[in-house]
Amino acid sequence: MPRLMGVDIPANKPTHISLRYLVGIGPTTSRELCALAGIDPHRKAKDLSDEDLARIASLLDKENFLVEGALKRQVQQNIERLKHIGCYRGIRHRRGLPVRGQRTKTNARTRKGPRKTVAGKKGVKDMR
């Protein structure tokens, strides 16, 4: 398996598909990288030479593509900034609630986690 930026990319897929396994590279960027490196995007990744991989790696470094660790670090810093300034989105991040306006009365289980049943919530039963 070829390695780029510390990530194993699939060998049996076309190069433009394999490059998408790097965080921060999508369909458009992968085709752009292939064009800049002079590589056929439909060639299998296992057929790439070490020179081809080195060309792609150097392009990722010098063309200001944010990928893998640097991109993850930047996203995390942005979230920490929002939390620090105390804006609405930062407060939602801090509380573990949906950030982008989704409803929370029902659903939102991905952010809120598994249900925590509260005793006596349904209502008080009639005492006779």
Image (cartoon, rainbow, N blue to C red):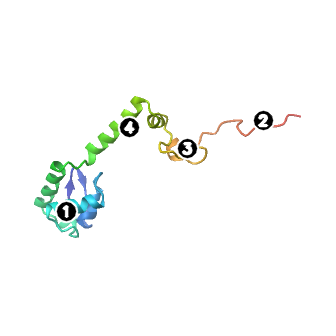
Residue type at numbered disc 3: Pro
Sequence-first tag of 3 and 1: 1
Instruction: For marks 2 and 4, give the one nearer the viewer.
Output: 4
The amino acid pointed to by label 2 is Val
Q: Earlier in the sequence, mark 2 or mark 3?
A: 3
Q: Amino acid at mark 4?
A: Ile
Q: Look at mark 2 in the image and give the residue it sits on.
A: 124
> Which label belongs to residue 34?
1
Examine the image and state in which quarter residue 42 appears: bottom left
Q: Residue furthest bottom?
A: 42
Spatial CA span between label 1 and label 4: 32 Å
- The secondary element bearing badge 3 is classed as loop
Look at the numbered disc 1 and give the secondary structure of its residue. helix
* Callout 1 crowding tier (Cα within 10 Å): few <14, some 14–19, many ≥20: many
Q: What is the CA distance from the residue labelled 2 to the residue labelled 3?
A: 25 Å
Name the image quarter holding the C terminus.
top right
Task: Say which residue appears at 53% left-offset and 41% top-offset.
Answer: 112
Residue position for label 3: 114
Q: Residue at x 25, y 52 (%)?
A: 7
- Lower sequence index among marks 4 and 3: 4
Residue 124 figure quarter: top right
Q: Position of residue 119 (x, y in %)?
A: 69, 36
Q: Earlier in the sequence, mark 1 or mark 2?
A: 1
